[in-house]
Image (cartoon, rainbow, N blue to C red):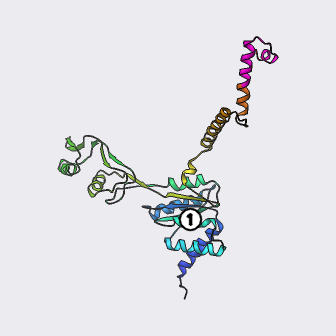
């Protein structure tokens, strides 16, 4: 007996199946600590931008994997490239579908929608936090609070002042209740959260989002550095190629010119080049 799904789930399955069928590019995004209002801002940015467009969809991992499995079965191709997304449908993730060829613009919309957030006790710190030296605006009765955290202070004009910058939290560590309370009292919101791009699927290829950081200038520089290295190797072993041949001709001509000058041999080419 097959399982009967609610109307809402059936609509979700139909929508996600249609997205898998109609779109050739997908961003797999992590959404830890991202609120519903922030997600709404991302959706609006993707809808209102004149140059790019995308559809954001979230759901339980089991539901997304089922839809993808059924889609692959309907296509009759277990090796369908969309199947590469399956291993990444775990954790708090979502999918952003687009047919825009400007993936860099889509990435910019996703990563720039971030909001500041307070440090919560027990949370992993995404970045290190340094509390700057200076007046805290807190009264002297709260010096014991700083002493508990081994923070050196002094009283200046009736207020507690931190003497030196304090490396309060290290990236990757869990925030302690004392650290969270201190940052809250100092009105410091040290963290910012947004969608994290985990993988990018583009017409059958799956790659890291770091690839989208490469500019045309960077690619040209990398290509030319490899061409120079290849040319140098070919010149060293005396093997002519399109990359090395101009340099080989130039080098050998210089040698011939040097010999001709040494033996005082008159050459019309040398005269035209005004080499004496």
Nearer to us in this view, 250 or 69:
250
Q: What secondary structure prevails in the magenta region? A: helix
Q: Is disc 1 placed on a helix, strand or loop?
A: helix
Taking the image as shown, residue 150 lies to the left or right of residue 249, namely left
- What residue is drawn where x is 52% and y is 59%? 42
In the rendered view, would you say 204 is above or below 225?
below
How many numbered discs? Answer: 1
Q: Quadrant of the N terminus?
A: bottom right
Residue indicated by mark 1: 85
Instruction: For label 1, count other residues whose C-alpha is less than 10 Å away and answer few (under 14), some (14-19) or many (20+).
Output: some
Residue 90 location in percent, x, y?
A: 48, 67
Looking at the image, the residue that sits furthest to the front is 237
Q: Is residue 88 magenta?
A: no
Name the foreground residue: 259 vs 137.
Answer: 259
Residue 258 on the magenta span:
yes
Q: Position of residue 210 (x, y in %)?
A: 54, 51
Left or right of 163, for residue 79: right
Q: Residue at x 33, y 59 (%)?
A: 120
x, y (%) of residue 242? Answer: 73, 37
Q: Is residue 23 above or below residue 11?
A: above
**Horizontal side, residue 251 vs residue 268: left or right:** left
Q: Please name the residue shown 74% across and 28% down the image.
A: 249
- In the displayed orientation, state which residue is furthest to the right: 268
Q: Position of residue 99 (x, y in %)?
A: 64, 60
Location of the C terminus (image quadrant): top right
The range drawn in magenta is 252-272
Which of the two residues, 11 or 261, is positioned nearer the viewer here? 261
Residue farthest along the bottom direction in this orientation: 1
Q: Which residue: 64% across, 67% down?
A: 80
């Amino acid at each position: 007996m097959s399982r009967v799904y609610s109307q809402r789930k059936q609509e979700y399955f139909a929508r996600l199946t249609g997205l898998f069928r109609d779109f050739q590019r997908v961003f797999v995004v992590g959404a830890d600590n991202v609120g519903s209002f922030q997600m709404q801002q991302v959706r609006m940015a993707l809808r209102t931008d004149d140059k790019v467009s995308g559809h954001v969809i979230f759901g339980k991992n089991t539901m997304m994997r089922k839809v993808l499995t059924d889609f692959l079965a309907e296509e009759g191709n277990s090796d369908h490239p969309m199947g590469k997304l399956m291993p990444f449908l775990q954790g708090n993730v979502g999918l952003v579908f687009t047919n825009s060829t400007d993936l860099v613009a889509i990435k910019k919309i996703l990563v720039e929608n971030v909001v500041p957030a307070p440090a919560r006790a027990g949370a992993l710190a995404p970045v290190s936090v340094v509390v700057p030296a200076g007046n805290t605006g807190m009264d002297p009765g709260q010096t014991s609070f700083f002493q508990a955290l081994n923070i050196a202070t002094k009283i200046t004009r009736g207020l507690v002042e931190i003497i030196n910058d304090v490396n309060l939290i290290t990236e990757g560590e869990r925030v302690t209740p004392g650290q969270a309370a201190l940052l809250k009292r100092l009105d410091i919101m040290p963290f910012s959260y947004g969608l994290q791009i985990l993988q990018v699927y583009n017409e059958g290829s799956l790659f890291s989002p770091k690839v989208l950081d490469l500019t045309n200038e960077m690619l040209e520089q990398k290509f030319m550095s490899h061409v120079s290295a290849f040319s140098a190797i070919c010149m060293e072993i005396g093997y002519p190629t399109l990359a090395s041949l101009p340099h080989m001709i130039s080098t050998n001509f210089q040698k011939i010119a040097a010999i001709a000058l040494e033996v005082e041999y008159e050459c019309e080419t040398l005269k035209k080049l005004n080499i004496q």
